[in-house]
């Protein structure tokens, strides 16, 4: 498989999933602004959406959209328990979390990376995000991971959002469950490996 990524972008989530799954893969770095690969090729020829992550399967098929990609990875390494079985009731709980992270966190971060928006506009989105993080903090009470005591692909995705919160200088110290959770994820060897491969510092 081949993962198209940009360091620290949401593609870090499937990168973590691939390492946790123990699956062989190649990394292809993408310049998202120029829409170019490291060898100069046009990334739009790979993924017309112009976005990462994109995962080229061994069959040649291209899969896009992070929440879908991480499920593909989890299903290819089912013994690792990175996602409940596809016919299990718990799978729908995982889908809930993946959809919550992608719609309520990921998309609300987008304005914070837009230099043309005013500070007041960004403050609005920070407040909105803080409310979402407060909800997650409440759900993490008494459990190690989003799904309970088992790390899943949803945890890798949430961890990336917590890194983005740091990048935007959001103070989440008032959410002790979330802070303990972030440290727990960051300490995982495969998470450390993904950060190292992307040239990122642990946070």
Image (cartoon, helix red, strand yellow):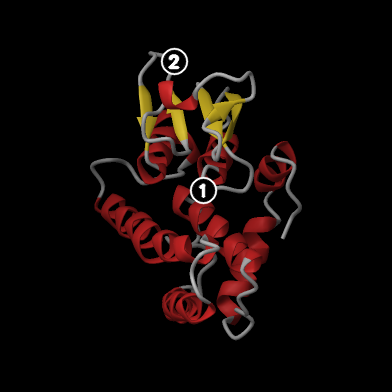
Is residue 148 visible in the rendered structure shown here?
Answer: no
**In the rendered image, which quarter is residue 16 located in?**
top right
Image disc number at residue 201: none
Q: Residue furthest top?
A: 59
Is the residue 130 above or below the residue 143 in the image?
A: below
Is the residue 147 above or below the residue 175 in the image?
A: above
Q: For the point 44% across and 15% down, which residue is it?
A: 58
Few, some or many residues within 10 Å of mark 1 (<14, 14–19, 20+): many
Count up the numbered dots. Answer: 2
In-image side of 134 versus 175 (left or right): left
Q: Secondary structure at mark 2?
A: loop
Residue 107 % position (x, y): 40, 60
Q: For the point 44% across and 59% down, which residue is it?
A: 106
Is the residue 187 above or below the residue 41 in the image?
A: below
Foreground of the two, 94 or 43: 43
Foreground of the two, 139 or 88: 139
Q: For the point 43% across and 35% down, which residue is it?
A: 50
Q: Secondary structure at mark 1?
A: loop
Residue 86 % position (x, y): 27, 40
In-image side of 109 versus 95 (left or right): right
Q: Residue furthest bottom?
A: 174
Q: Earlier in the sequence, mark 2 or mark 1?
A: 1
Is the residue 202 above or below the residue 132 in the image?
A: above
According to the picture, the residue beneath numbered tag 1 turns out to be 10
Q: Quadrant of the C terminus?
A: bottom right
Few, some or many residues within 10 Å of mark 2 (<14, 14–19, 20+): few
**In the rendered image, which quarter is residue 108 located in?**
bottom left
Image disc number at residue 58: 2
**In the rendered image, which quarter is residue 196 located in?**
top right
């Amino acid at each position: 498989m081949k993962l198209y990524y940009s360091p620290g972008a949401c593609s870090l989530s499937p990168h973590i999933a691939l390492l946790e799954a123990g699956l062989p893969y190649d990394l292809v770095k993408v310049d998202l602004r120029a829409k170019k690969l490291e060898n100069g090729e046009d990334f739009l020829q790979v993924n017309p959406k112009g976005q990462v992550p994109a995962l080229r399967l061994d069959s040649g098929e291209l899969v896009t959209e992070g929440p879908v990609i991480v499920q593909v990875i989890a299903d290819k390494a089912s013994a690792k328990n990175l996602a409940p079985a596809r016919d299990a009731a718990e799978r729908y709980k995982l889908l809930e979390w993946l959809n919550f992270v992608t719609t309520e966190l990921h998309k609300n971060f987008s304005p914070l990376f837009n230099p043309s928006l005013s500070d007041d506009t960004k403050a609005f989105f920070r407040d909105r995000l803080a409310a979402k993080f407060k909800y997650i903090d409440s759900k993490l009470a008494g459990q190690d991971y989003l799904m309970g005591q088992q790390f899943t692909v949803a945890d890798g995705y949430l961890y990336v959002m917590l890194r983005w919160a740091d990048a935007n200088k959001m103070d989440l110290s008032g959410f002790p469950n979330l802070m303990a959770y972030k440290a727990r994820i960051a300490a995982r060897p495969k998470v450390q490996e993904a950060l190292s491969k992307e040239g990122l510092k642990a946070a």
